[in-house]
């Protein structure tokens, strides 16, 4: 099959780890998504397959743990200098900071300390916020999951829906219009679209009143219970619209192109010959066969939802992980940035492994 | 040096992309019935449910508002995250500004002219030998839990910073010259010094309540952000804080200087400056400061808006060119790779003679700055110094060419300045990649110095601290925020500030070490007579100017905006023309008077909470109704198709 859109991983507005490999995490070789993993016959074969995938995932995770330690020590910038710059600081204070952060230790010592505590789930204390890294992450994670999770569900549904219809009526006005429209939105920088929405729908233009808040996740007016949920939903609307608008094109195009690949299939002619309605032919026969690449993309996107969407989070002042990652990087706040990197990578690895495991269940051809 | 004002760089969000048509995407026909699609739908719903479930328990609803409906709220847009609410740890501008509101300091600075005035201390006096300072502590200051605030609290605060390394993290430098601190009576605080120190009326240290803080074991891990309201004795009391969402304070009605006019002060987070400006237009916030200032375009458009006033006043920063004088340690070990030509004063002066400061103010700052002169900005009138006409290194390219000729750098056949060793004069300037002003001025410098025959490479970095401390630069864009007491910005050019080890961090700004300057520095630090001290400071500025390792190009203005239908009046600092956000004191928020309701039917209090809450409810309900309607439609369609298929 051909995936028209190869730009994977961090789409516009999403700052994620490097483009994740397609779901064969352990192998790492970028095999086409439609080529299902080769699975040995039989029940034991499947178990061996699962064990292999899980082992691969565990090894990847270990590699990420190690990489994240060295990766952020290579980027230029001294956390202590960065944090104390522009401020009255005595040499004793600076040395004391180094001691507090453990930066006075030799590198190997720092590394073994890091490994020992990271394996027990302790990622240390943030340099700049003086709070356990885990606390900072659990503070911001729900906001990010709410934003990117909601957007994920919407753009996946919209993308599959429009994509399958566009392919079925290929070349017609609807197809051309939706494909062009989606691609146009895809090319729009998310922060710019976000600002446009703020100017029009938040502040209001002409007779149109300001309908939505300009930013934040809540009014902070002491709402509770259902009022609080409504308040958050109100704040959530514009950032979700922005994310969906720039993201749905990917699902749409993958769905469209994989369905196009199926369109010439003899089985469709057979189905039609049986006298089935065109709609049914598409829904019951064509789309299920074309869904696999989309499921791949779905898992890739799902893995990325944790990383948040830094630009959209910034424009809408959403208190999520994207913004936290940016702040952590600019110091660099080593414990925080390491933990976030591990978290982002782990979620991608987890989703890819899940995709690997789910494949045989989704497509009976694979397990046969 | 590297960071200016401790502002973290804002993510780049330039508005340069062309417009695109935006029409709503209307899906073709609804389709419901595919099994796998339904599976997806179900899993989608499950994911939504999961995220919602994850959100709810970790985000308990904030406590119900204490303020009744008639309460006035002042909402301020901020961008910088709070690093810590513990005064022992906080170094960022947003946090230290909030501490000014929560806690009293021994002294404050007069909004009129920045001179030290009573704060927690009503009077202070040095002993004849200059080594003991005695502060009289006021008897009308109470902690918000009802306990009396006394000299013992102040003594405990300073003593803890002297004894506990963790407590010294942020403000340790203030006590490094302290020998002993004691509180012989509730109204007397006595500080004994190792050496005379003229800055004893400028100890910017929040005084903490001993009875609350003395039980804490590890100050490096205590962020003071768990138990609300936080006990303090400043003009405001911090009542609630949610990371990157808001910081809430309520007026301290018992504050000894008088209660603030607003009942509540809220700092709300807007991470993007354009979004903050939009929130101001809408009335969601009452004040926007920009970081560090509104852009010229934002200021221009806000000036035309109704009910919005743009406040422009002299800033507290200077924007300068720093020259690498040859990096070295205290012991004289040289390191780094600064250009040797810059060791010649004639070359340095030639470079500065070729800088057209007027153009920089007009074109780069678009008028929102004041042309640079001495080291300390004119806002601090007591210490402001300007070169005399004879001393001034004015814009004069001809003079610059003559000076270069005199220094032995002559123009060769290709128009390049070449030294006696035959090498062309090519320089580098270190620039902050996150600062558009650095880049713009870099372009001008390339042009001006290029005309003289000097090559210039503008080296922009996200993080300049490494080459900076390593001394691996020729020139650099430099800037500092200046405090009412100039001691600190003067100290960073003394030999004492040089690093002890090559390439390690140190207090020095750009490795300047000059014995005459140092002598003056020592004199001013021991001079307790304000007028005499100011005179010494001015002589230091003059010396620094002549040395030519530091040349101030401009003093950027503070450009801020507020809603006149929320705020009737507010005190700037300096009072005649000054800034509002980030003052050396609590004057702005303490003095702000709410606009009354009689003007044009406009809501007197901040429009944020009241009406947008109702709109929120309406829109939210509409959204839920729409969702239900769509769901119902889908269900109906599904039923219909099922029926058809059964045929």
Image (cartoon, rainbow, N blue to C red):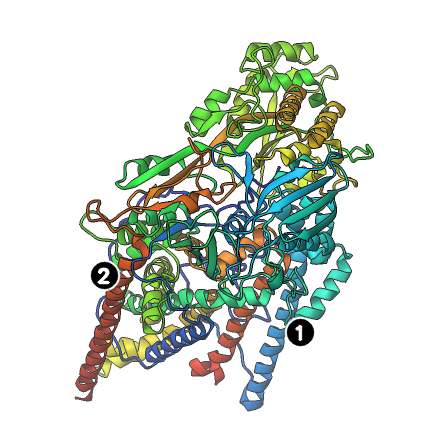
Task: Please name the residue that numbered disc 2 is placed on.
Answer: A174
Chain letter of the residue beneath label 1 in the structure image:
A
Q: Is residue B190 above or below residue A133?
A: above
Q: Which dot, 2 or 1, sits closer to the camera?
A: 1
Chain letter of the residue beneath label 2 in the structure image:
A
Rate crowding at label 2 as few (under 14), some (14 to 19) or many (20 or more) other CA atoms within 10 Å: some
Q: Is residue A229 visible?
A: yes
Residue A79 placed where, x, y %? 65, 50
The residue tagged with tag 1: helix, strand or loop? loop
The residue shown at (17%, 84%) is B644
**Disc number placed over residue B425 in the picture, else none:** none
Same chain, labels 2 and 1: yes
In the image, taking residue A232 as reference, residue B238 lies left or right, namely right
The residue shown at (52%, 66%) is B227
Q: Point out the image quarter for the N terminus of chain A.
A: bottom left
Residue B29 placed where, x, y %? 21, 70
The residue tagged with tag 2: helix, strand or loop? helix
Camera-side residue: B532 or A352?
B532
Disc nearer the start of the sequence (2/1): 1
Residue A78 placed where, x, y %? 66, 48
**Disc number placed over residue A120 in the picture, else none:** 1
Residue B413 placed where, x, y %? 62, 12
Camera-side residue: A156 or A334?
A334
Query: Marks 2/1: CA distance?
Result: 54 Å
């Amino acid at each position: 099959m051909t995936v028209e859109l190869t730009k994977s991983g961090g789409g516009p507005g999403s700052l994620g780890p490097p483009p994740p490999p397609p779901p064969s995490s352990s192998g790492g070789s970028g095999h086409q998504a439609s080529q299902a993993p080769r699975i040995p016959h039989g029940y034991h074969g499947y178990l061996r397959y699962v064990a292999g995938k899980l082992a691969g995932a565990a090894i990847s995770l270990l590699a990420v743990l190690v990489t994240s330690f060295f990766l952020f020590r290579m980027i230029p910038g001294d956390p202590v200098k960065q944090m104390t710059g522009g401020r009255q600081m005595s040499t004793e204070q600076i040395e004391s900071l180094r001691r507090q952060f453990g930066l006075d230790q030799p590198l190997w010592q720092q590394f073994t300390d890091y490994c020992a505590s990271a394996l027990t789930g302790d990622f240390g204390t943030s340099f700049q916020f003086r709070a356990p890294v885990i606390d900072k992450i659990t503070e911001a994670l729900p906001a990010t999951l709410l934003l990117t999770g909601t957007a994920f569900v919407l753009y996946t549904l919209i993308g599959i829906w429009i994509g399958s219809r566009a392919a079925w009526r290929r070349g017609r006005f609807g197809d051309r219009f939706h494909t062009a429209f989606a691609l146009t939105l895809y090319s729009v920088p998310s922060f710019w679209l976000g600002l446009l929405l703020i100017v029009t729908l938040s502040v209001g233009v002409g007779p149109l009143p300001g309908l939505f808040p300009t930013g934040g996740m809540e009014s902070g007016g002491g709402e509770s219970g259902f009022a609080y949920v409504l308040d958050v939903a109100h704040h959530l609307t514009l950032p979700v619209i922005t994310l969906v608008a720039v993201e749905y094109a990917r699902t749409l195009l993958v769905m469209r192109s994989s369905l196009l690949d199926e369109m010439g299939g003899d089985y469709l002619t057979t189905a039609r010959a049986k006298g089935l309605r065109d709609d049914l032919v598409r829904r019951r026969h064509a789309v299920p066969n074309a869904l696999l690449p989309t499921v791949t993309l779905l898992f890739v996107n799902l893995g990325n939802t944790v990383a948040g969407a830094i630009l959209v989070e910034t424009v809408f002042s959403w208190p999520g992980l994207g913004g936290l990652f940016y702040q952590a990087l600019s110091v660099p706040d080593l414990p925080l940035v390491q933990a976030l990197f591990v978290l982002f990578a782990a979620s991608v690895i987890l989703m890819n492994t899940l995709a690997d495991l789910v494949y045989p269940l989704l497509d009976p051809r694979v397990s046969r | 040096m590297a960071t200016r004002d401790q502002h973290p760089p804002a993510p780049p969000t330039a508005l340069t992309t062309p417009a695109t048509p935006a029409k709503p995407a209307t899906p073709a026909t609804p389709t419901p019935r595919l099994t796998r699609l339904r599976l997806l739908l179900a899993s989608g719903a499950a994911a939504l449910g999961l995220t919602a479930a994850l959100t709810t328990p970790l985000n308990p609803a904030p406590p119900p508002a204490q303020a009744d409906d008639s309460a006035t709220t002042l909402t301020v847009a901020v961008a910088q995250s709070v690093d810590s609410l513990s005064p022992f740890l906080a170094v960022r501008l947003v946090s230290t500004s909030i501490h000014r509101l929560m806690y009293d300091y021994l002294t404050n600075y007069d909004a009129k002219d920045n001179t030290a005035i009573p704060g927690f201390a009503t009077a202070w006096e040095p002993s004849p030998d200059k080594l003991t300072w005695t502060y009289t502590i006021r008897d009308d200051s109470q902690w918000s839990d009802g306990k009396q605030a006394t000299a013992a609290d102040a003594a405990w605060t300073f003593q803890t910073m002297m004894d506990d390394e963790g407590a010294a993290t942020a403000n340790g430098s203030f006590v490094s010259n302290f020998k002993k601190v004691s509180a012989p009576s509730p109204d007397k605080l006595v500080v004994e010094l190792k050496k005379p120190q003229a800055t004893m009326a400028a100890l910017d240290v929040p005084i903490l309540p001993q009875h609350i803080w003395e039980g804490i074991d590890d100050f490096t891990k205590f962020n003071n952000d768990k138990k609300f309201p936080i006990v303090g004795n400043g003009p405001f009391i911090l009542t609630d804080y949610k990371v990157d969402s808001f910081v809430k304070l309520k007026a301290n009605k018992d504050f000894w200087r008088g209660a603030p006019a607003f009942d509540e002060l809220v700092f709300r987070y807007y991470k993007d400056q354009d979004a903050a400006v939009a929130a101001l237009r809408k009335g969601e916030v009452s004040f926007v400061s920009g970081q560090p200032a509104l852009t010229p375009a934002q200021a221009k458009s806000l000036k035309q808006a109704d009910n919005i006033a743009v406040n422009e006043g002299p800033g507290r920063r200077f924007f300068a060119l720093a020259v690498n004088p040859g990096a070295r340690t205290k012991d004289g070990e040289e390191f780094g790779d600064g250009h040797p030509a810059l060791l010649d004063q004639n070359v340095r002066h030639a470079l500065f003679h070729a800088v057209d400061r007027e153009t920089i103010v007009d074109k780069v700052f678009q008028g929102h700055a004041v042309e640079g002169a001495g080291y300390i900005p004119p806002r601090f009138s007591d210490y402001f110094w300007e070169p005399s006409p004879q001393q001034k290194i004015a814009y004069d390219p001809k003079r610059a060419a003559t000076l270069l000729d005199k220094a032995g750098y002559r123009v060769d056949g290709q128009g390049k300045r070449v030294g006696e060793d035959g090498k062309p004069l090519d320089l580098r300037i270190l620039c902050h990649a996150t600062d558009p002003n650095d880049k713009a001025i870099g372009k001008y410098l390339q042009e001006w110095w290029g005309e003289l025959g000097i090559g210039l490479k503008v080296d922009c970095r996200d993080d300049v601290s490494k080459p900076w401390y390593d001394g691996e630069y020729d020139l650099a864009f430099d800037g500092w925020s200046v405090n009412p007491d100039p001691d600190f910005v003067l100290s960073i050019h003394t030999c004492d500030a040089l690093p002890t080890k090559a390439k390690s961090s140190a207090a020095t700004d750009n490795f300047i070490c000059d014995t005459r300057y140092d002598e003056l520095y020592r004199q001013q630090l021991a001079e307790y007579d304000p007028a005499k001290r100011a005179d010494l400071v001015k002589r230091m500025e003059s010396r620094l100017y002549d040395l030519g390792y530091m040349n101030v190009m401009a003093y950027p203005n503070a450009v801020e905006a507020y809603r006149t239908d929320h705020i009737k009046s507010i005190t700037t600092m300096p009072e005649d023309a000054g800034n509002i956000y980030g003052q050396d004191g609590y004057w702005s928020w303490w003095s702000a008077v709410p606009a009354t309701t009689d003007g044009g039917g406009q809501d007197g209090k901040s429009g944020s909470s009241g009406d947008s809450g109702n709109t929120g409810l309406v829109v939210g309900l509409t959204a839920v109704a729409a969702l239900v309607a769509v769901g119902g439609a889908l269900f109906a369609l599904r039923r219909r198709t099922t029926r058809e298929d059964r045929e």
